[in-house]
Amino acid sequence: MALRELLTDKIVLINGGSQGVGAGVARAAAREGATVVVTGRRAEVGEALVAELTATGAKAAFRRADLADPAQARGGVEDVVAAYGRIDCLVNAAGLTSRGSLLDTTPELFDAHIAVNLRAPFFAMQAAVADMVARKAPGTIVNIGSDCAHGGPPYLAPYSAAKAGLAGLTKNAAHAHRWDRIRINGLNIGWTETEGEDAVQRAFHGAGDDWLEQAARTQPMGKLGQVDEMADFVVLLLSDRSGVVTGSVVDWSQHVIGGSD
């Protein structure tokens, strides 16, 4: 149940909210009093999350969506507005992390990254901001990016390109709509412990069952980024408690960008 009630009576849409960071944000937002709608491609996962949330007394719903389709990216927002009369908060948390370097990335892989990691947030934001502007109402948006926006490893070339674009889009949209009282911020997350990361490590890097413990030992804080900690910060950015902050893209990472040894 709500603790600080930072999002009481807010209508919150979380794209890519059925698992990983998005699901963590859904749990945190529901705890803070929001009505939560999550989108994702896997209905069984999304519906299980909604059942978990509603069992605690929260208001939650799932909408199946393939965010690579811009019509479905916009459609999630439009469905929320149709069902609840408005959208107050949007979180773009969907992410494609399939591997590709500058030399081996195909046009198809590049386009897939742009579609999910950049185009989907663009058109979801377009629909959300249109509703907020039409109602002359304030709102908040948080885009989940990556510290790869600053460069990234060689095997994440299209991902890094798309996330760099998302960081720029976040600032552009925040500047464009600050006088509408719509605050738009981003979170560039580092290496994070999620179900999806486990699958990626096993599929692309031949990781064994102890990969997480080994990876944690290589990190300054002795652990990978934790979803629940990120989710609390996202809720803060969505809420009035973050004040006037807009256009900020925060590096949520234990590696200091630009630092060197």
Image: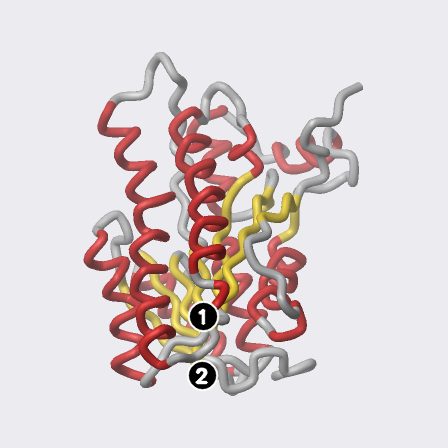
Where residue 203 sits: x, y (%)?
42, 30
Vertical order, 251 against 76 (above or below): above
Instruction: Tell me if 2 is positioned left or right of 50 in this view.
Output: right
Q: Dot 2 lies on which element?
A: strand
Q: Image point 45% across, 83% down: which residue?
A: 59
Mark 1 surroundings within 10 Å by alpha-carbon count, few (fewer than 14), some (14 through 19), many (20 or more): some
CB under 8 Å between discs 2 and 1: no
Q: Quadrant of residue 125?
A: bottom left
Vertical order, 221 against 50 (above or below): above
Quadrant of image for the N terminus: bottom right
Where residue 159 sits: x, y (%)?
42, 33
Given residues 219 and 116, the one toward you in this image is 116
Check disc 1 and give the amino acid type. Answer: Asp
Where residue 151 sits: x, y (%)?
53, 26
Which residue ends up furthest to the front in the rendered image? 179
**C-alpha separation, residue under disc 2 versus residue under disc 1:** 28 Å
Q: Image point 67% across, 41% down: which residue?
A: 253
Given residues 52 and 221, the one toward you in this image is 221
Q: Image point 54% across, 70% down: which residue?
A: 27
Q: Which residue is mark 2?
A: 59
Describe the colour scheme in one phrase: secondary structure
Where residue 180 sits: x, y (%)?
45, 70
Which residue ends up furthest to the top in the rendered image? 103
Check disc 2 and give the amino acid type. Answer: Lys
Q: Quadrant of residue 33?
A: bottom right
Q: Which residue is mark 1?
A: 180
